[in-house]
Amino acid sequence: MKLSLSVRVAESSTRKDRAEMPLEELAPLARAAGFRALSMRASAVSVDTKPDRLRDIRALLDREGLGVSMVTGNVALAANTPAASDALRDIGPHLDLAEALGAKLVRVMIRTADDIPHAQRAADQAAERGLSIAQQTHWGTLCETVDQALDLVSAVDRPGFGITFEPANLLGCGGEYGPDAIARLAPHLANVYFQNVRLNPDGAHCFPTRAKGDVRLDYVALDDPSGMDAAEMVAALKASGYDGWVTVHQPLRSGETVADAVEEAARVFGALV
């Protein structure tokens, strides 16, 4: 497996359109901490980024020896708004972004059954360019549970389509998210995300799930035992034979600096992956 850091580490948990640290500072910090790639989001670079800026970012990454594990091409995808599935209907700019940054994986959102034919065409277009698309296990989509994820893989039925395993969303939606879930999803995993949460009816954050309605929770430290077990997840991934990217996808917590968050991510996951 390979360790990646989401640029979400420089976003607050409530703002997905703005980063607290520019890539020129974040990339060297990530590399020095031992990460091999960044997972790019629209707070740092998007389908609307100018070509000159894209070239500058690619040069920065090359100088730091960093890859790009996945691109999330606009804020709608990052926030899972109703416009998130529009990318499936015009996947070209998202594939262009991936190619410009040297990434092989593009994040998409499949929210309704009407999106599936568009996902099939998007996967075909990606495959023609040697790329793949991935749907995250995520509230408000056709991928809130392991069963739904497997059904979605069957419905899209394209080799260039896979699943990003993200256990916090599975927990919030009330489904299985532990080793059994990983074993079932393993043949279809294109990526892995980890953010640590603790369910709390009075929590500061809300996942508006279809399965259970609004679910409240708190973000906690990556190794907080009251949250999710990163070590168990990584062990299950190893047991399943997964050898792709594992991305720390944790937002900034209240009072935390980006440097502190990067250090915590490296300390917890560098010992595991």
Image: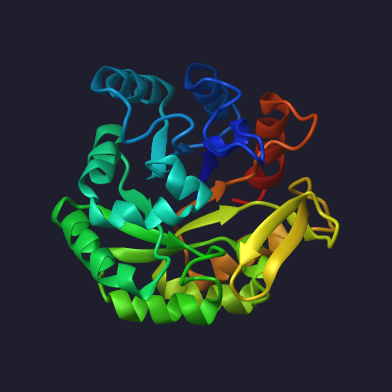
Q: Which residue appears farthest toward the front when viewing the image?
A: 82
Query: Is residue 124 or residue 201 the one in the foreground?
Result: 201
Task: Provide residue 9's location: percent of width, then percent of height.
Answer: 61, 35
Q: Is residue 136 above or below residue 255?
A: below
Query: Is residue 101 or residue 12 the one in the foreground?
Result: 12
The residue at 23%/59% (across/down) is: 122
Query: Which quarter of the figure has residue 216?
Result: bottom right
Colour style of the rendered protein structure: rainbow
The residue at 39%/39% (across/down) is: 68
- Whether residue 228 is visible: no
Query: Which quarter of the figure has residue 50?
Result: top left
Q: Is residue 207 above or below residue 221?
A: below
The residue at 55%/54% (across/down) is: 193
| Position of residue 268 in the picture relative to residue 150 (left or right) | right
Query: Which quarter of the figure has residue 189?
Result: bottom left
| Position of residue 60 in the picture relative to residue 195 (left or right) | left
Task: Provide residue 94's location: percent of width, then percent of height.
Answer: 28, 44
Query: Is residue 119 or residue 243 the one in the foreground?
Result: 119
| Position of residue 231 in the picture relative to residue 51 (left or right) | right
Q: Which residue appears farthest toward the left when viewing the image?
A: 128
Task: Provide residue 26's location: percent of width, then percent of height.
Answer: 54, 24
- Whether residue 231 is visible: yes
Task: Provide residue 147's location: percent of width, then percent of height.
Answer: 51, 82
| Position of residue 233 in the picture relative to residue 198 (left or right) | left
The residue at 58%/23% (across/down) is: 29
Number of numbered tags placed on the structure image: 0
